Amino acid sequence: MKARVKRSTGMMGGLAKVSLFVDDKEATKLSNDEEFMIVSNKESVRVKAKQWFLGSKEVEVKENEAIEIRINSFLTLFYLVAFILLFLSGMSVTREPKLIFSVSALVVILIIIFISTRSWFVMLKTSGTNSDRT
């Protein structure tokens, strides 16, 4: 069985390499726009990506399928919301809005950290003309 994995994380994930795990064993570390060919004698393999504490859900890959690793755009939007809340906190003059914006930003950041352990990366699976997000 052969399958192709490509990392397409753009600027957001460009500083560190992403570890690619095939059947729970680290196969390689991918830089942005780098590809890796999975070769196995099995009918299918389980693939997931990790970078520090950030990760993806595990995906089953079969013969001639292609996987594209991307960053979850929903979570990047959440990060933007957290930074806006922090900015508003810094710009607030009175104590009450400053506290409300700071606590809200902290809650959003904690939610992002919790969700990111298994959903920071999205594995876009393509096989011929079929594609689905996992």
Image (cartoon, rainbow, N blue to C red):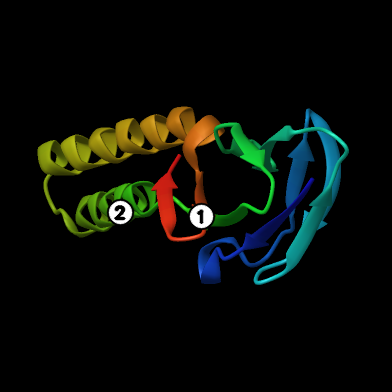
In percent of width and height, residue 123 lies at 53, 47
| Mark 1 residue element | strand
Residue drawn at x 35%, y 35% is 106
Q: Is residue 40 left or right of residue 126?
A: right
Residue in the image at 63% along x and 62% along y? 7
Left or right relative to 50: residue 2: right
Viewed as shown, does residue 41 lie left or right of 45?
right
Q: Nearer the viewer, mark 1 or mark 2?
A: 1
The amino acid type of the residue labelled 2 equals: Leu
Quadrant location of the N terminus? top right
Mark 1: amino acid: Thr
* Front position in the image: 87 or 108: 108
Residue placed most toward the observer, 99 or 58? 58
The crowding category of the residue bearing disc 1, from other C-alpha atoms within 10 Å (few below 14, some 14 to 19, many at least 20), is: some
Do callouts 1 and 2 mark residues in contact (Cβ within 8 Å)? no
Quadrant assignment, res 34:
bottom right
Mark 2 lies on a secondary structure that is helix
Q: Quadrant of the C terminus?
A: top left
Q: Position of residue 100 (x, y in %)?
A: 17, 35
At a point 75% along the width and 33% down the height, the residue shown is 43
Above or below residue 42? Residue 65 is below
Percent of width and height locating residue 93: 14, 53
Quadrant of the image occupied by residue 110:
top left
Residue matched to label 2 = 77
Q: Residue at x 66, y 43 (%)?
A: 49
* Location of mark 1 (residue): 126
Judging depth in this view, the residue of 41 and 4 nearest the camera is 41
- The alpha-carbon separation of the residues under discs 1 and 2 comes to 25 Å
Drawn side of residue 131 relative to residue 103, left or right: right
| First along the sequence among labels 1 and 2 | 2
